[in-house]
Image (spheres, grey):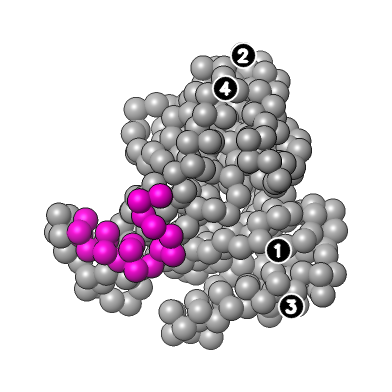
Amino acid sequence: MVFKFSRKNKHWVGIETGTESLYAVEVKYHDGQPVIVSCGEEPLPPPDSENSEKRWQPLSAALTSLIKRFNLYEKEVIAALPGAEVIERIVQMPVMPARELNEAVRWEAEQSIPLPLKDMEFRYLTLGPAPGNGKLQNVLLIAAPSSLVRGFHTTCQEAGMTLRALDLPALALWRIFCGLPGSPGEKGRIIILHLDPGITRLVAVSEGALFFTRTWSGWAGSGSEIPDLDLALPFWTELRRSLEFLRGQLYSETAGKVILSGSCASAPDLNAFFSRTLELEVEAGSLRLKTLTSKDQTGPGEEETELDPRWALAAGLALWGYK
């Protein structure tokens, strides 16, 4: 698993592997600011869950088609691993020198991650001071099964994709909703809720800093309709549990405004439905970004466009090189 943060490249393609589709967003930089070149979507057939040898075949075929249709050959891709197998834990640790932190993080990971680290690709990122306590820092622990990383990397190579790095969905969502000038998460508290038909990703941000993330399955909805409450009961159970935890962490009665993103975020009346159910302020995570208007995609023609929330994660991945 690669987590490099080079700023040299000025052209990235972010690819999200959703439950039912691949989403790709291509970004270039003009005058230091990101500009959307193109967006692409490719249907993704379900994998063969009963045959591990065939697990990657649908993804390989979809990636090959996506790369061909949108001419992504030789363009460097930032992607996130599919599914919900990547383990993410944000822990609070004392501020300490880097060498001591390396040893302390390894010990903390062995206590926090429920699988043997020898079978995992493990990394960590320091996220800055913990809210309300300058003596502690938030550290993001990241572990993914080595077999998952190898399988995904091999599949990308076979499809002809130039995989520059693997990134985390939580970081991509933080980047798109909090990392750009004028973003809704620059100040205050927000909860980003990324809704995919099979996976829910929650990212909590306070004053621009990521301090909580969680992934679970069970939305059971689609981009065109809201699921029955009984059908989506596991989703609501996990969401309410997460909100209660956040209130405790923030010592506050409210965990913040909720921003919806993902392929299911555009269902009619979804904002009002979530607002009534959670008794919180809820809005769709619309993305206002510049897009190239010249036919040769070299500029300087640009215009500001509002992108659908389903592109949020892929766009955040494509902003991997943004400073």
Q: Position of residue 5 (x, y in %)?
A: 35, 38
Give me the C-alpha separation between circle 2 and circle 3. Answer: 47 Å
Residue numbers of the magenta segment: 101-120
Which sits in the foreground, 73 or 218? 218
Q: Amino acid at mark 4?
A: Glu
* Disc 3 + disc 1, Cβ < 8 Å: no
| Residue at screen point 49% across, 69% down | 189
Please give the residue where the numbered disc 4 appears in the rendered image.
158
| Left or right position of 153 against 42 | left
Q: Is residue 323 magenta?
A: no
Which sits in the foreground, 261 or 48? 48
Q: Amino acid at mark 1?
A: Gly
Q: Amino acid at mark 2?
A: Asp
User: Which disc, if any, is residue 277?
Assistant: 3
User: Which disc, if any, is residue 218?
Assistant: 1
| Residue at screen point 17% across, 55% down | 98
